Image (spheres, rainbow, N blue to C red):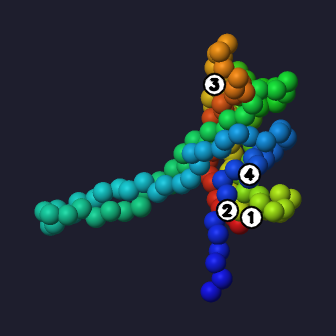
Amino acid sequence: MARVDPYKNYRFKVEIQGIIEAGFAECSGFGSEVQVVEYREGGDVTTARKLPGMAKFPDITLKWGVTDSLKLYNWHLDAVNGNVQRQNGSIVILDEADPSQEKARWNFINAWASKYVGPSFNAKGNDVAIDTFTIVCERLERVK
């Protein structure tokens, strides 16, 4: 059987409908969970049944270097001002040898930027200034 190596975590892109930006330094937190509803029947004194409850999708955190572009910030600012603009998007792992080829894709649905954290500054450092955005979504699916 041929060996199949896992994909590397540094070759990725994030696509957000209507917002096209440069690459992100980090994308984390996405996934899904089905809540567990415990139900105990009157005749069973020792155990509870576990039933599936509501599906939940954690927040997606995006980090990227500060640039002149305000597209992501303005998306968040719209929400702050009460005008939530829901967007669909994708998190994509790219082929290491050929970055134009996709290896895996997760689509997030009805997302909006719920939180913005500006960069930390330190006059003694030489790091890139990083913006952090938190995106909430109603659904996430791996499609590839």
Q: Mark 4 points at which residue?
A: 12
Does 107 sit left or right of 29 as displayed?
Answer: right
Q: Please name whichever residue, 12 or 53, is drawn nearer the observer in this view of the structure.
A: 12
Vertical arrangement, residue 60 with respect to residue 4, above or below: above
The span from disc 1 to disc 4 (Cα, nearest Å) is 10 Å
Q: Please name whichever residue, 41 or 17, is drawn nearer the observer in this view of the structure.
A: 17
Label 3 vs label 1, nearer the camera: 1
Residue drawn 38% across and 56% down? 36
Q: Name the residue under label 2.
A: 7
Cβ atoms under marks 1 and 2 closer than 8 Å: yes
Q: If you read the primary sequence from the N terminus, does the residue marked by circle 2 or circle 4 appear first?
A: 2
**How many other residues sit within 10 Å of disc 1, few (<14), some (14-19) or many (≥20)?**
some
Q: If you read the primary sequence from the N terminus, does the residue marked by circle 3 or circle 1 appear first?
A: 1
Residue drawn 37% across and 62% down? 51
**How many other residues sit within 10 Å of disc 3, few (<14), some (14-19) or many (≥20)?**
few
Q: Mark 3 points at which residue?
A: 117
